[in-house]
Structure formats: structure tokens, C-alpha cells
Amino acid sequence: MGRPAGKSSEETRAEILAAAHKQFARVGYERATNRDIAADAGVTAAAIYKYFASKADLFAAVATETMETLMPDLLKAARSAPSARRALVALLRTQLAAAQHVEATRFLTTIPIEMKRHPEVAEALVGQPGPIFELVVEVVERGVREGEIARGKAEQVVGMYIAILIGLAIHGSTVPASHNAAAVQGFFDLLDGKLFRPPGA
């Protein structure tokens, strides 16, 4: 059984993605099998390869689709902020407060861990930067245009911000919630210029 009778290629792909999301969220990347994903989607395991070159590519596609569910709120938060710095703060606050997207947020927090454990996942995700990365780039480019960020520092700002997001996700999966909340607040204070005081102040 390849594509189920009466279903379009787009519908079949969507059902594979939904089944993969369920399996990856339930048992993780390593334990999720194409056979179980295919069974949930109502296709054969071989049929998955008509849409995705590998399990890592399937994971990356699920990650991108999951990010898309958060994008309306993230776009609104970033584009309504008065500055690039405030937009970067708003992006993280909005993602943390996305209670209506609990499943999406829970899945996204596992991505850095899976990237660390499985190089093929990291490679696939780097090849598909995703909408959140693109939005961070947009915010930083705005900061450059408005003189808030030096042009030569733009790549550093993007890299630092993404690295901190990944680090906070990994940190949050290994420590009590109160500890991660303190780390998040520390990041906000860093962006706001409140984390360090001048010597002697």
C-alpha cells in the first residue's frame, strides 16, 4: 500500500507528518520507527521514502511544520516591538507563553537534544533553517537598518541568540523549572543591559 486510494499526495504527506510527530513526541527520534509511523499514517514503510529521503529528513520536516504553528504569534510579537532588542525579548517571551501550543512547544524543546544525540538530525535541520531562524534574521536585519546593531555584528547576534535558545531548551530539560526560569530571566536582563553593573557602581 503506497498512497491510500482516494487521497492526494498532499493529504498523504500531511498524514505521514502527523503520524511522525506523534511517534517522535511519544518515544523520541531513536525509538520511532518508519514501520510505526507508516502504520499510524495508513501507508507502507516504503511509501514514506516517496516523500522523505530519510528519517532525519522526516524529523526536520516535522520540526519545520511544528514551528509554523507558532509563527502567527511570533510574527505579531516581533513586528510590533519598538526595537530589535525588544523584538528578541518578545520572541522568547511569546514562545514560552504559548500555552495554546503545548504539544508544539513540548516537541520543539526536544529538538536540540535530538540534534546533540544524532548528527544526521543536526545535519538535516541545518539544511532546513526553518521559519523561527528566518524571523530572527529579519529582526537582526531590522536592527542593522535602524542603527541598533552594527552591520559587522549581525551574524554574531543571530548565532548568539539561536545558541542561547538551544541552550535554554537543553537546560530546561535537565533542571527544575525554577532554575530554568532564573536562566531565562538572566537572558532577558542581559538583553536589557541589566545583568552587569559598571565596576564601583
Image (cartoon, rainbow, N blue to C red):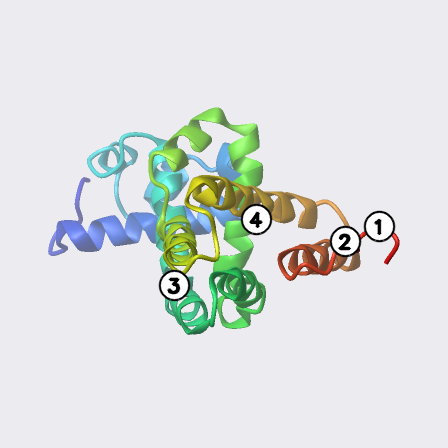
Total residue callouts = 4
Which circle's residue, 1 or 3, is located before the other in the chain?
3
**Real-space Cα distance between discs 1 and 2?**
9 Å
**Real-space Cα distance between discs 4 and 3?**
16 Å
Which circle's residue, 2 or 4, is located before the other in the chain?
4
Quadrant where the N terminus sits is: top left
Secondary structure found at label 2: loop
Q: Which residue is mark 3?
A: 71
**Real-space Cα distance between discs 1 and 4?**
29 Å
Q: Disc 3 marks which amino acid?
A: Met
Above or below 177: residue 116: above
Residue 73: where, in percent of width, then height?
42, 70
**Closest to the observer, 15 or 146:** 146
**Real-space Cα distance between discs 2 and 4?**
21 Å
Q: Which residue is mark 4?
A: 165
Quadrant where the C terminus sits is: bottom right
**Real-space Cα distance between discs 1 and 3?**
41 Å
Label 3: how many residues lie within 10 Å, few (<14), some (14-19) or many (20+)?
some
- Residue 116 occupies quadrant: top right
Above or below 178: residue 82: below
Q: Which residue is mark 1?
A: 199
Q: Residue at x 44, y 32 (%)?
A: 121
Which circle's residue, 4 or 3, is located before the other in the chain?
3
Secondary structure found at label 1: loop
